[in-house]
Image (cartoon, rainbow, N blue to C red):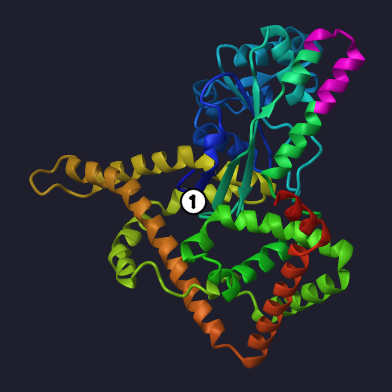
Amino acid sequence: MTAFYSRIEVVNAENFPTSGPVLVVSNHENSLVDGVLVSCYLPRMPRLLAASTIWDYKPLTPLLKAARVVPIYRQQDVGVQLAKEKPLFDRSSEALMDDGVLSVFPEGLSHNHPHLLPLKNGAARIALEAEAKGDRLGIQVVPVGLTFEDKSTFRSKVLLQVGEPIDITRQADAFRATSDVADRRGLVRDLTDRIQRSLYDVTLNFGSWKDAQLVRQATELWQSTDTWVESGADAQTIAAMQDRVRMQRTFARGFAWLDRNRPDLLARATSDLERYLAARGDSGTPLGAVRSLTLRWPRTTLLALYPMWLIGAALNFFPFHLSRWFAHGKDEDKMATWSLFSSLLLFPGFWGLQTLALGGIVPHAAHSGFNWPLFWSTLILAPAAGFLSLTYLDLRKEVRERKSARAELGAEQDLQHLRSKLTVQLEEMVHAYVNRPEAKVRRSKSK
């Protein structure tokens, strides 16, 4: 995971209960990668629920067993009889006993939408059924939001945000006290709604991908202005995924409010932003990079890492491009999964083949037999140089972005004028949203 993604941030980990049974609920937009992130980066490792059909992929079987994944036997996959023999809620309750941690994706399937899908009732039923059978287990439902900078792009960033635990005591007591089917369904729906609201608080949600793109670009531009920097944000803060996501969430709410109350102001800014991006061209430079021009890494570091990049690129060329080939043409929510899981076999396999070939082909200085020193040194060097190559690529990308940012500062006058105009419009929009009547009322009450 840390090879594919350049940064994986976990925020509010202190919200995660240190003991007791926990049901983790997460959004689901990146196939098996979501399960790996939830399993590896939370304070306590949960067991995952997964469709039984995933066991059909035989290379994954050892990993599924090692992670103690709980299979879901769906009627459409295995037939009615087997689904009845191995009911989901019995096995889920067992997993939550003895202070266990279980993870589910209540949207039901991986998807490519820019927002949460309506949640299925399964997560709420698992929690309430387990409480009813376990006699006050004290299960806490914890929302975990997964936000990807660009989920299928190599060396992009990921944010895991742990939300406030949901206390289900009231619903659990009511669920346990009744056997009426309609009453129990109502309690399940009520808890599902609470889970949905909690997940909204830790994820990014937009009406369309166009809205998502505009909010992201407006946020980056705002973070590059003097107004933002003067408020106390430094270059490291601007780069933090957590801060960017929080700002995008605020801007999304602001855009929605402006769309209802000041559509003229929003329409003008949106039009000018689209004109600015078109005039700017596809430079690949984040808008926020224009403000923070001081390089954190000297170029001498790049020069020092260059030999390792050459070695790492040579020794890892074939498995890297083969893993990309495996992912090519797949649905966007599955591309990273295909690339990552194929790499688990491709990289070690090619390291072994390369070292065997070099050991047998290159003669040893002392004798004519197998060149064991070269074999072991190459076997160690291949992954080590590959890791240093990733560091080199990240630094080179940053240098190029800053160079492009400098070039933009010296761009033609029309582009600079449009950027200044947009900055003024953003300040006006932020001022209108911050000083909206309902916000003033809330501030007055808090005082």
Tell me if residue 256 comes above or below residue 372 in the rendering. below
User: On the picture, is 309 further left or further right than 124?
Assistant: left
Residue 56 image position (x, y, % from top left) = 63, 25
Q: Residue at x 58, y 72 (%)?
A: 224
Residue 108 appears in the rendering: no
Q: Name the magenta segment's main secondary structure.
A: helix
Q: Which residues are magenta?
A: 175-190
Residue 235 image position (x, y, % from top left) = 48, 66
Please check the rendered image and state whether residue 356 is part of the magenta-colored stretch, yes or no.
no
Viewer-side residue, 78 vs 173: 173
User: On the picture, is 194 further left or further right than 289?
Assistant: right
The residue wearing badge 1 is 7
Viewer-side residue, 299 vs 97: 97
Viewer-side residue, 409 vs 168: 168
Viewer-side residue, 298 vs 384: 298
Residue 194 appears in the rendering: yes
